[in-house]
Image (spheres, helix red, strand yellow):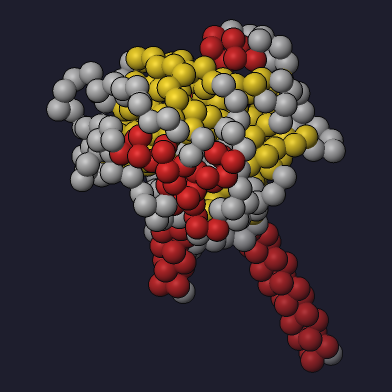
Amino acid sequence: MRRRIAALLTALLATQVGALVNPAYACGCGAMVPDGQSRIAVERETSVVRWDGRTEQILMRFTVGGDAQRAAWIMPVPGRATVELGDRSVFGDLDRLTRPERQTRSYFWPRGGDWPFSSGIRDGAGAALPGSSDTGVGVVGREQLGDFDVARLTATDPDALENWLESNGFKLPDRLATEVKPYVDQKWEYVAVRLAPRQQGKPLRGDLDPLKIRFESTALVYPMRLSRMAKTPQSLGLYVLADHRMEPSSTIGGSAPEVTFAGKVTPTGGALAELTGRAPVFLTAIEQRFPEPGRIDADHELRATAKDTPYRRVVYRNELLTVGDGIPVWLLTVSAALVALAASAFVVLRRRRRRAAA
């Protein structure tokens, strides 16, 4: 019994550790491209989307690893965009607002780790982008923002866009021109970012400063199509701030999106209040996995749900039901039952002896 319980607990622990150590997160808004033969991995992406029905703002923070000292990041946008550095405090505020509710749930019978299945000892685990002479690409703006050199581009030919980027020292995926073509056909524009630390010779690692991209849009769209070029399973996490609870209109080739929080919030100060205009907004936190990124077939389009139903995850802490100084209720119940059974047996035996004597 102890071996089976230990094996079960080990399997559960391994499952939980596997959920916490996620090996790959989606660069859902674009494509991260390293310089030359170096490599870069987006270990985590967290995005905040603010949409008021006319203007969309996307605030992104990347955690990257690898040995690349420079890299390019490309994001298609449906209209003319402005780019600025974001405030990382927004992510901490949203994390606190969406934390799950914690409740204690009692159980009656002992489980693995409870006496008599344990010894009573518990563990505690519970370089700037130059302009282009290429007639198929136009540079409409360029800004230096911290470690980012940002170019805002237009393109009428996907091959011209690919050639322009490659001419600036980047080895791009062979499929990039093909994947960009739908955006070119729709006359979208592009935000190209060169990530280069101001300290020369330093590889891009850890949390990068967040970037905020703003553009006009009458529909809430989150670019995802370029993530189909990823080689490993991807995960996407979104904080959506809008007038109503929002949901993706389709799975776009991934698993069913999971809402981890939904409810009205009223930021009172800081960068989050500035992002929302200090007005009450409906916050929806969404997570989605893409086991096969090649199946991503569109960008996310989000729409209002029929009702603004609030939701908060509940994390239960299972606890053995006890009374007094931690005495298990099951032990008292079993003891009382045994005493009652013994008393009944004593009474029956005594009656039998009296009858035999009579």
Q: Identify the residue at horizontal 42%, vertical 52% (top origin).
A: 175
Where residue 353 sits: x, y (%)?
76, 86
Q: Is residue 350 visible?
A: no
Residue displayed at 52% across by 17% down = 82
Q: Quick check: 270 above or below 12?
A: above
Horizontal side of 209 relative to 212 (left or right) equals left
Q: How many marks?
A: 0
Picture coordinates of residue 331, whole percent (x, y): 60, 59
Instruction: Give whichever of 172, 260 is nearer the camera.
Output: 172
Residue lying farthest to the left in this orientation: 201
Tell me which residue sits at (19%, 20%) in the image: 199
Q: Tell me if residue 125 comes above or below residue 80 in the rendering.
A: below
Viewport quadrant of the C terminus:
bottom right
- Where's residue 241, x and y in %? 66, 25
Q: Nearer the viewer, residue 266 or 112?
A: 266
Question: Quarter-wise, where is residue 223 in the image?
Answer: top right
Residue 177 seen in render: yes
Q: Residue at x 64, y 34 (%)?
A: 221
Q: Is residue 317 left or right of residue 174?
A: right
In the rendering, at what x and y percent does residue 100 appear? Answer: 61, 36
Would you say 254 lies left or right of 139 here? Answer: right
Q: Quadrant of residue 138?
A: top left
When the figure is inspected, residue 222 is found, relative to residue 175, above or below; the finding is: above
